[in-house]
């Protein structure tokens, strides 16, 4: 395990100067513990096993070394040189966007392939050549089966949030994808937990990994306050509405898509800027909803567990379990939406009389000690614990999106056909290199 008492600056981790300068321009001056621990080992080519919850800084911990390796030479068409596997589309987009400025700094092209978006753009990008590919297992498998992608040239790969991928049923696809890369490929695995199926992946696909556990399981809840709010069934809806009407960003978790839509509509009808997020919505709608939540146009987000695995928004200080989760892992994943990057947060679970025993067992399995409160709508105690307040009662209607200005006439000048991160197209490239395995 890694001692994180003394952490060097980024310029002491072995990163290229171009990356260090870009980090400084972006205000990233001191590495998080997982970054200080994992980056040197990753740069040296070792397999790395990292245990850390969401918000611990692991994207840069694996992303920067992968970009260094991927930028050493250009990728051949359809044959990425580095691969990051993630469980959800939203997380794929977050990883891509987080690494984009650093990809520009080293002249690497980063692309993504995810479900819910057109195949054409992704196939075109792969044909152009992608140095670092961020992908969800399902869509990547589809593109490989279509002959649009080949993993034979991958030199380094990352499994990000591996426990979530296993929990969501992706283990068979992940194993199949790992079997397609060369045995000597460097593997980095990051997960909040290292048990069960994750341990099977480690044993089967990693070689003497350097292990860095800067955020062990007991620490995942250390920066959060946990509360059980005991309510009567007749009061639950009013209590939820008053909590959602608080100032600041709030995520409310429910068990079903229908519940998410129903509750968000009721909140909006009471005057709360709210929206739902679940797997039944298209990717474009989900992306727009998250963008509005990030910039404050929506203050209350009502989400299901599956959709919430891709929510990575800083500044969320309250998570509300309107419906209790199915198990302690889901409780921890929900709570991980708050207390990110060393900040504090609060997790509140609303419990009716017949749910108290289930709630106590759930919290015990999660290693959580929660304060219990008997609350009623309008209570000072409810406001003290959650910031709850009375909603305006004036129905909230989401303002329409501003119209984009239309172009007047055709655009003149040479057509720019470069990749998203600004690097010029790679014309005149030789054909795909032969697979190393």
Image (cartoon, helix red, strand yellow):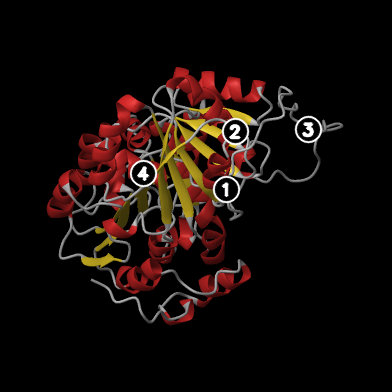
The residues tagged by marks 4 and 1 sit, at their Cα atoms, a distance apart of 34 Å
Asked if residue 120 lies left or right of residue 432, the reply is: right
Residue 369 position, x and y percent, is 32, 51
Residue linked to disc 3: 404
Looking at the picture, tell me which residue is in the foreground, 393 or 209: 393
Q: Which mark is residue 419?
A: 1
Given this view, does label 2 or label 3 mark the residue nearer the observer? 2
The residues tagged by marks 2 and 3 sit, at their Cα atoms, a distance apart of 43 Å
Give SS at disc 1: loop
**Residue 267: quadrant of the picture:** top right
Looking at the picture, tell me which residue is in the foreground, 372 or 329: 372
Residue linked to disc 4: 333
Q: Earlier in the sequence, mark 1 or mark 2?
A: 2
Q: Is residue 26 above or below residue 118?
A: below
Given this view, does label 2 or label 4 mark the residue nearer the observer? 2
User: Do the residues bearing badges 2 and 3 touch, measured as CB atoms within 8 Å?
Assistant: no
Residue at (29, 47) in percent of width and height? 162
Q: Is residue 207 above or below residue 154?
A: below
Give SS at disc 3: loop
Residue 220 position, x and y percent, is 34, 55
Give SS at disc 4: helix
Q: Earlier in the sequence, mark 2 or mark 3?
A: 2
The residues tagged by marks 4 and 3 sit, at their Cα atoms, a distance apart of 38 Å
Give SS at disc 2: loop
Given this view, does label 4 or label 3 mark the residue nearer the observer? 4
Residue linked to disc 2: 378
Q: Earlier in the sequence, mark 2 or mark 4?
A: 4
């Amino acid at each position: 395990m890694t001692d994180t008492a003394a952490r060097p600056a980024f310029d002491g981790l072995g990163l290229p100067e171009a990356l260090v300068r870009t980090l400084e321009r972006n205000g990233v001056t001191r590495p998080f513990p997982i970054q200080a621990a994992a980056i040197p080992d990753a740069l040296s080519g070792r397999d790395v096993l990292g245990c850390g919850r969401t918000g611990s800084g692991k994207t840069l911990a694996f992303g920067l070394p992968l970009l260094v390796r991927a930028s050493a030479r250009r990728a051949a068409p359809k044959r990425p040189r580095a691969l990051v596997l993630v469980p959800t589309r939203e997380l794929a987009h977050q990883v891509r966007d987080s690494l984009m400025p650093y990809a520009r700094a080293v002249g690497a092209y980063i692309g993504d392939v995810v479900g819910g978006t057109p195949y054409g753009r992704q196939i075109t990008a792969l044909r152009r050549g992608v140095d670092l590919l961020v992908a969800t297992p399902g869509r990547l498998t589809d593109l490989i089966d279509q002959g649009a992608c080949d993993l034979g040239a991958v030199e380094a790969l990352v499994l990000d949030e591996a426990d979530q991928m296993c929990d969501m049923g992706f283990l068979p696809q992940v194993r199949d994808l790992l079997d397609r890369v060369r045995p000597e490929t460097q593997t980095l695995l990051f997960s909040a937990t290292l048990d069960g199926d994750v341990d099977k992946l480690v044993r089967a696909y990693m070689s003497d990994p350097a292990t860095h556990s800067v955020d062990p399981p007991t620490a995942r809840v250390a920066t959060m306050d946990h509360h059980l709010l005991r309510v009567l069934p007749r009061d639950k809806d009013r209590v939820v509405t008053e909590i959602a009407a608080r100032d600041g960003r709030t995520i409310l978790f429910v068990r079903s898509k229908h519940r998410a839509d129903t509750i968000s509509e009721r909140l909006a009808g009471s005057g709360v800027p709210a929206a739902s997020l679940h797997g039944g919505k298209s990717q474009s709608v989900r992306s727009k909803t998250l963008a509005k939540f990030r910039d404050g146009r929506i203050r209350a987000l009502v989400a299901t567990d599956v959709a919430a695995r891709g929510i990575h928004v800083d500044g969320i200080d309250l998570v509300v379990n309107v419906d209790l989760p199915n198990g302690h892992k889901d409780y921890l994943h929900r709570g991980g939406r708050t207390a990110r990057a060393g900040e504090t947060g609060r997790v509140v679970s609303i419990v009716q009389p017949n749910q108290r025993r289930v709630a106590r067992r759930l919290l015990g399995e999660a290693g959580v000690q929660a304060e219990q409160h008997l609350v009623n709508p309008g209570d000072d105690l409810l406001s003290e614990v959650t910031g709850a307040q009375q909603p305006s009662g004036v129905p909230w209607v989401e303002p329409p999106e501003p119209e984009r200005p239309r172009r007047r006439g055709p655009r003149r000048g040479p057509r720019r056909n470069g990749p998203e991160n600004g690097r010029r197209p790679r014309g005149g490239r030789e054909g795909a290199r032969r697979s190393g395995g």
